[in-house]
Amino acid sequence: QFQTSLNINYMSQPLLCASRAAFAAVKSDGSVVAWGDAERGGDCKRVHLELVGVTGVTATSGAFAALRNDGSVVTWGHRDQGGDSRTVKDQLSGNVQHICATESAFAARKEDGSVVAWGHPEHGGESRAVQLKLTQDVDRIFANKSAFAALKKNGTVVTWG
């Protein structure tokens, strides 16, 4: 069964994280090591040169997202579970402050209060229906197994997934 870690300080990302069948850990030098089922993120060779200056990792059931100290994001693992972020790569190239995950999708909160989502559409990887509400003023993002909730600075909540 899919499990996620409890992160008390929502702005910090875990240094050790697990997908359904793999682990990823941030080493003291900011690089990342992954092991386990290669299709579930246990093999990060494709992106290992990008995994520098990593401050934390987050996992879906089959992929990982690493947040770097320059605010960019690197992903690997099962493409349908968030491991392929090419469609939002430009939006993840900087200013990301926090990453949250459902079972098969990621959502990233940026410095300007906007949110970028990718991964399986039925688990929150598709946010087009609410995207205009996610362009600014998002304070925090939360996730359950298949949906995200964005708490805005005015106290309203936007959900998708």
Image (spheres, rainbow, N blue to C red):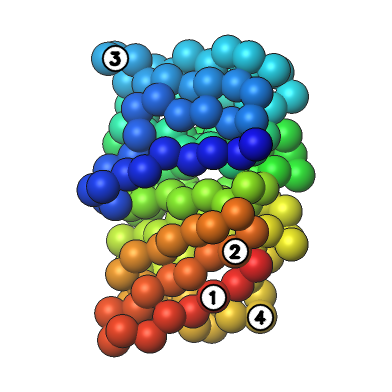
Pick whichever of labels 3 and 2 is earlier in the sequence: 3
Tell me where residue 30 sits by quadrant.
top left
Give the SS element for disc 4.
helix
Which of 114 and 61 lies nearest the eye of the viewer? 61
User: Closer to us: mark 1 or mark 4?
Assistant: 1
Alpha-carbon span between mark 4 and mark 3: 40 Å
- Relative vertical location of residue 5 with respect to residue 150 in this rendering, above or below: above
What residue did someone put label 1 on? Answer: 159
What residue did someone put label 3 on? Answer: 29
Q: Residues within 10 Å of mark 2 (few under 14, many from 20)?
A: many
User: Closer to us: mark 3 or mark 2?
Assistant: 2
Q: Quadrant of the N terminus?
A: top right
What residue did someone put label 2 on? Answer: 147
Task: Write the residue at 63% across / 14% down.
Answer: 36
- The amino acid on which the numbered mark 4 sits, given as a three-letter code, is Ala
x, y percent for residue 72: 42, 43
2 and 1 marks in contact (CB < 8 Å): yes
Task: Write the residue at 59% across / 80% down.
Answer: 130
Name of the residue lying farthest toward the front: 1
- The amino acid on which the numbered mark 2 sits, given as a three-letter code, is Ala
x, y percent for residue 46: 65, 20
User: Closer to us: mark 4 or mark 3?
Assistant: 4
Pick whichever of labels 4 and 3 is earlier in the sequence: 3
What residue did someone put label 4 on? Answer: 129
Alpha-carbon span between mark 2 and mark 1: 7 Å
Task: Write the residue at 43% across / 34% down.
Answer: 57
Alpha-carbon span between mark 2 and mark 4: 13 Å
Q: Which mark is residue 106?
A: none
